[in-house]
Image: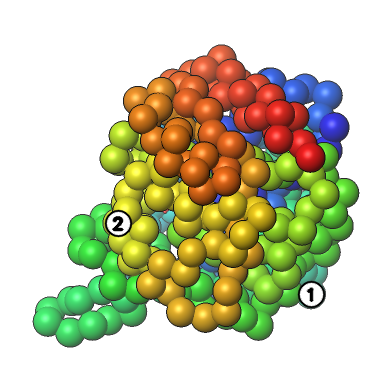
Amino acid sequence: MRIVVLAGGIGGARFLRGLKKAAPEAEITVIGNTADDIHLFGLKVCPDLDTVMYTLGGGINEEQGWGRSEETFRVKEELAAYGVGPDWFGLGDRDFATHIVRTQMLGAGFPLSAVTEALCDRWQPGVRLIPMTDDRVETHVAVELDGERRAVHFQEYWVRLRASKPALAVVPVGAEQAKPAPGVLEALAEADVVLLPPSNPVVSVGTILAVPGIREAVAGAAAPVVGLSPIVGDAPVRGMADKVLAAVGVESSAAAVAEHYGHRGAAAPQGDTEGPEKAGLLDGWLVDTVDAGLVERVESAGIRCRAVPLLMSDLDATARMATEALALAEEVRG
Ligand code: FO1
């Protein structure tokens, strides 16, 4: 079975570990978000690609969900001693090696997709990891700082500001000019199942869908499309999805996120984002058992909905979620 997953960082990576356990025979292709990417100290850092690669390859710092295990920070300390910033982004010594190899290969003319494949040769994540695009896309967030509206890089918003201020706008800069990376559209066309994992619907899945052609490829896929809510109760399981959901006019609820993605048979509601009508994506949607009361509302939008435990408390729990998602995909397969 060929499964394609549009994944962001920590939530998506943890889900993928469960999916691999639930479907060990499946051929999994991950379309990874690259709009979180940041250039630091002359290096290109790809947080979401690295989180998937390290998590599935066994090198992740488990409690953080990002960065390497057994990390040290000598280089970071030396950079600070030179007064070279920023100091708010925790790059460890082992992690620096990944960014050095990546930047060296990019500098030699290899596209990000080829670089990612080369890095995965070492980590053997057990999935095919393709960046959403080989072109540069970076999410910037508009916030009010010192009384004026400023655009900051997503990582500065997320890490330095801790998403402590409302996001007035979230813009994947460069998305309009970006092209899907080689293999992305083919994987979606050939998929037997397409999954939207519990990643951030705005700054992870949303940015992947912002690359021209990808949203249409998901909406037009022969495969059933099933998503898992990143919101349980009225709060994100992890991260600060609610902060950026507000920026696109979506309430922080499992039903609102499903409506935001839209039902595959219809156009997705625009919310307060302008622009051309967007194709709806979902055939099925999983909400947590605490949100069982929302099943009817999601189904009234034409999206088949089931309430199952969605807390990825351990590998078995995550594998059960993945199994439920695959079962729902079979149920809605037209
Ligand atoms: N997140 C933090 O909250 N603090 C950090 O210092 C930090 C450093 C960091 C370094 C490399 C990397 O790949 C990820 C890092 N992250 C950090 C997480 C990152 O902000 C998020 O994983 C994604 O961008 C959101 O999914």
Do the residues bearing badges 1 and 2 touch, measured as CB atoms within 8 Å? no
Q: Say whether residue 144 is visible.
A: yes
Direction from residue 59 to residue 131 in the image, left or right? right
Q: Position of residue 132 (x, y in %)?
A: 68, 61
Q: Position of residue 18 (x, y in %)?
A: 61, 25
Q: Quick one: label 1 or label 2, which is nearer the N terminus?
A: 1
**Closest to the observer, 1 or 271:** 271
Q: Position of residue 116 (x, y in %)?
A: 73, 55
Q: Which quadrant holds residue 194?
A: top right
Figure check: 181 above or below 315: below
Q: In percent of the image, x 77 and y 36: which residue is there?
A: 333
Q: Label 2, on which residue?
A: 243
Q: In percent of the image, x 65 and y 53: which residue is there?
A: 264
> Quick one: SS at disc 2?
helix
Q: Label 1, on which residue?
A: 109
Q: Quadrant of the C terminus?
A: top right
| Within-10-Å neighbours for mark 1: few <14, some 14–19, many 20+ | few
Q: Position of residue 96 (x, y in %)?
A: 54, 54
Q: Residue furthest left?
A: 147
> Quick one: SS at disc 1?
loop
Figure check: 202 above or below 297: below
